[in-house]
Amino acid sequence: MKNFVFISPNFPLTYWKFCAELKKNGMRVLGIGDSPYEDLIPDLKEALDEYYKVSSLENYEEVFRAVAFFTFKYGKIDWLESNNEYWLMQDARLRTEFHITTGPSLADIDKIKFKSAMKKYYAKAGLPTARYHLVEGMEDALAFAHQVGYPVVVKPDNGVGANHTYKLKCDEDLQFFMDNKDDAQYIMEEFVNAHIQTYDAIVDSRGEPLFESGNVTPMSLMDVVNDCTDSRYYLVKDLPDAIRDAGLRTVKAFGVRSRFIHLEFFVLNEDQAGLGKKGDILGLEVNMRPAGGYTPEMYNYSQETDVYKIWADMVAFDRNTKPIGNHHYCAFYGRRDGRRYKLDDYEIMMKYKDHMKMWGRIPDALSGAMANQMYVGNFDTEEEMQNFFSDMAATYEG
């Protein structure tokens, strides 16, 4: 029996389903987390063969001892995974120290964790990227901003989501940023007028996709976080050929094997000198895990399948035994508390009751990028989906 150590199996809330499918596939599933065992939901308790509680998952020595305990008790660990960007570095360190070869090691981490290091591999895939500069001081930052022209975007070189990401429009904005930034290494990039499309997939040990999807984010996630606006995105009904091609080339360039991946691309909204024509695709960021929030559930609704099962099949069998069904657009809309919407919750649910798949409160930990109240629905045409977005967004304000 193969041993699988799952880090933080209770968060995000739906990740117990990964554990359940692993167990169904004959794996021994060993969990490590900092929540008390009695706080785990019954489904997760049923899926785990054993759970080791640490005082904090941030304490590497404690987590190391947990893996060592499982190794002593059950033998060599075959897989170790969190499927979570936040623990990517720790996962790699644990794999390296325990000689687990089924995922990225510390030797692989730079190219999949640091935004500046990703640029070389996107180039290897034949995809352009925004010009960039690693910020050291005001003088060099100012020189780069004047070279590419304002606005510029600054963000942590090693960061998650759109946290601490800012658009700077002038020298005064840059000075304010430099005076108030933290000690993290920041990357500065030229501003790209584009929307984000993704290539999301589960790939086998040869880098071949067992499942493919993609989402479109029509607005800037940076603006959603910084301006506290509503949030929306959707999974495409059919993956565009150009995005699939860019995704597969990126998989090959980064040497991705046996993973759930979420690869982000810019699609230009207009011609941009030095980058390309309207509609051209640029590399943005790679994420070696599923898309965040409730997107794994949305994959299932969009293609009438079960990505938790497909991923567990990849781990256990290096193939997929779960059929893919009919395809739909799957739309997410997040509303902010305190806004006066023209259609209230009841009216939305009644109008879209035949489409709605999920609704409810968003945990505070996710509300910065996803707002406070979520609605997820399936639609067969883009027009139906856009009408849903319009109804969700309509307010009595402004």
Image (tube, rainbow, N blue to C red):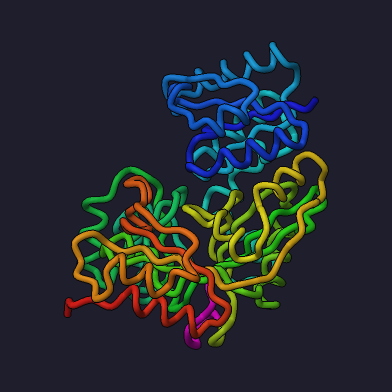
Residue 149 falls left or right of residue 119: left
The quarter holding residue 334 reads bottom left
The vertical placement of 154 against 393, above or below, is above
Which residue is found at the position 72% from the left and 51% from the top? 256
**Does residue 271 show up magenta in the picture?**
yes
The quarter holding residue 91 reads top right
The vertical placement of 70 against 17, above or below, is above
**Residue 346: image x %, image y %?**
31, 66
Which residue is found at the position 72% from the left and 59% from the top? 211
Which residue is found at the position 31% from the left and 64% from the top? 335
**Does residue 371 show up magenta in the picture?**
no
Q: Let me know if residue 130 appears in the view.
A: no
Stretch in magenta: 266-275
**Residue 380: image x %, image y %?**
58, 78
The vertical placement of 383 against 12, above or below, is below
Residue 88 falls left or right of residue 34: right
**Residue 19: image x %, image y %?**
63, 36
Of residues 1 and 86, the one drawn nearer to the viewer in this rendering: 1
Of residues 222 and 239, the one drawn nearer to the viewer in this rendering: 239
Which residue is found at the position 58% from the left and 57% from the top? 286
